[in-house]
Image (cartoon, helix red, strand yellow):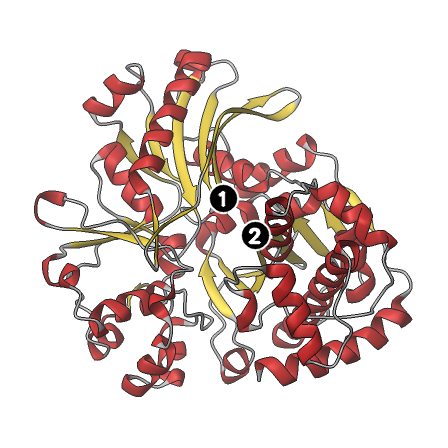
Amino acid sequence: MARPCDPAFLACDLGASSGRAIVGRLTDAGLRLEEVHRFANGGVRVGKRLFWDVLHIWEEVQHGLHCAGQQYGDALVSAGVDTWGLDFGLLGAGDTLLGNPFHYRDPHTDGMLETAFRKVSRERIYDETGIQFLQLNSLYQLLAFVETGSPLLEVATTFLNIPDLLNFWLTGAKASEFTIATTTQCYNPRTGAWALEMLRALGIPTHIFGEIIPPGTVLGSLRATVADRVGALALDVVAPAGHDTACAVAAVPAQDRDYIYLSSGTWSLMGVEIPEPLITPASLAADMTNEGGIEGTFRFLKNIMGLWLIQECRRSWAQAGQTYTYTELSEMAATALPFRSLIVPGAPGFLAPADMPAAIQQFCAASGQPAPESRAATARCVLESLALEYRRVAEILDRLVGHRLPVIHIIGGGAQNQLLNQFTADAAGRPVIAGPAEATAMGNILIQARALGYLKSWEEARAWVRRSVTLTTYEPCDTARWDAAFARYLRLHDQYLT
């Protein structure tokens, strides 16, 4: 195909707290990124309910397209949307959106795991889906609709995860992209199709689930109405990997697949790339998940409550009148006493507390540990506990894949947290390679470039990552102290999560 000089690709990267439009170009100096638009995102509370303002998100996506078109003109060849997982919109007659999509932290899924297991065994659900049990999953959101008699399911015609919904509004193409579909716990990775029998057993209507397409599918051009609104752009819309973590893992700068990735952000997602799903009694016992990846791979991983813990502490302290940067919080944590108090990041009390520092203090007091009295001590408690959880999951991965994985690649925003990166190397006893911080946008853009023929293979795509970023390696040290802390952490974990 004819290639414009340094073609430009637009990544619409939408996270739970912010959204961005980032243009990437393949240049002689490497893959170069420019943020052309950013907006705040987050849940909107109505009474006791928490929703997404998806129409606001849609307006911002269009504005991002407009900004990119204004700056890059005809060089802009495609756009692709990635978002967080789990959440979805339902369409009814005339493709009308039925209500505001729920936010995954809304409590309407409380008790739904237990309700599901009364209808279909935990073992069968895992055997059919291979997905970690989180009440946030789309499956339990849909089950909550069933249990409450929601009228939405009675009139719904189409289920679309958030990136698929935005793609539909952009192009008119209704389809479920593979990587985001696998996060729902409604998909069977063995059959490569929706888990229809299990869904029927739970009372969830199956006619709402449609075609599943692979990442890198070219969906077509912008609808005429959208193109006119954003400046008469003539570009292709590509479904990259709809799930932001799948995009991020696509940009891991490794030369082989014998490594652990840790996508570090609001959530920490830690796992390995494998060619086939790994669904066994051992993976069920460890509550591991099999999510779709690029080029037919699966991301065998664990979802971990990540930097949400420190983000929520920061928000509480800002409300109290003191605003810190994340760098300042890490510097404060470095001054605090080590291993004084530990928490279990996945404990239920940390999912959506009104006051995260208070929740941490309450956990420590209830578990017989000193409650952190300073903000520095609280930040250190969080970072040390995350590093210890990363070691726990790394050792599970070693065991399940059958050998010790030699290195951890940390990607995403958390790759910039030098203290946490060093803690992770020390706790896990293996080198950590940090970068790129912009893995999600990079992966999104490289998938688009591959789909349109600008890259010949995924090995070539990852070579672009390596030549485009500076990576930092953290070697493990002081491992004996971390070994002692890990023994304490395992006792706490077993007490609160088994």
Q: Is residue 168 above or below residue 77?
A: below
Residue corresponding to mark 2: 266
The quadrant of the image that shows the N terminus is: top left
Q: Is residue 116 visible?
A: yes
Q: In the image, what residue occupies the spot 46% across and 13% down?
A: 71
Q: Is residue 91 above or below residue 29?
A: below
The quadrant of the image that shows the C terminus is: bottom right
Looking at the rendered structure, the number of numbered marks drawn on it comes to 2
Q: Amino acid at mark 2?
A: Thr
- Dividing the picture into quarters, in which one does residue 127 lie? bottom left
Residue 287: x and y, percent? 52, 76
Asked whether 473 or 305 is in front, the reply is 305
Residue corresponding to mark 1: 17
Q: In the image, what residue occupies the spot 76% across and 52% down?
A: 421
Look at the numbered disc 1 and give the secondary structure of its residue. loop
Give left or right: position of 8 versus 187: right
Q: Amino acid at mark 1?
A: Ser
Seen from this angle, which residue lies furthest front? 320
- Dividing the picture into quarters, in which one does residue 148 lie? bottom left
Residue 59: x and y, percent? 32, 30
Asked whether 129 or 449 is in front, the reply is 129
Say if mark 1 contacts mark 2, CB within 8 Å: yes
- Dividing the picture into quarters, in which one does residue 147 lie? bottom left
Residue 182: x and y, percent? 39, 60
The disc, 1 or 2, on the residue closer to the chain's N-terminal end is 1
Q: Is residue 269 above or below residue 164?
A: below
Structural crowding at the residue carrying mark 1, measured as other residues with C-alpha within 10 Å and reported as few (<14), some (14–19) or many (≥20): few
Residue 155: x and y, percent? 10, 58
Look at the numbered disc 2 and give the secondary structure of its residue. loop
Q: Could you tell me how far apart the alpha carbons at marks 1 and 2 are, in whole angstroms?
A: 9 Å
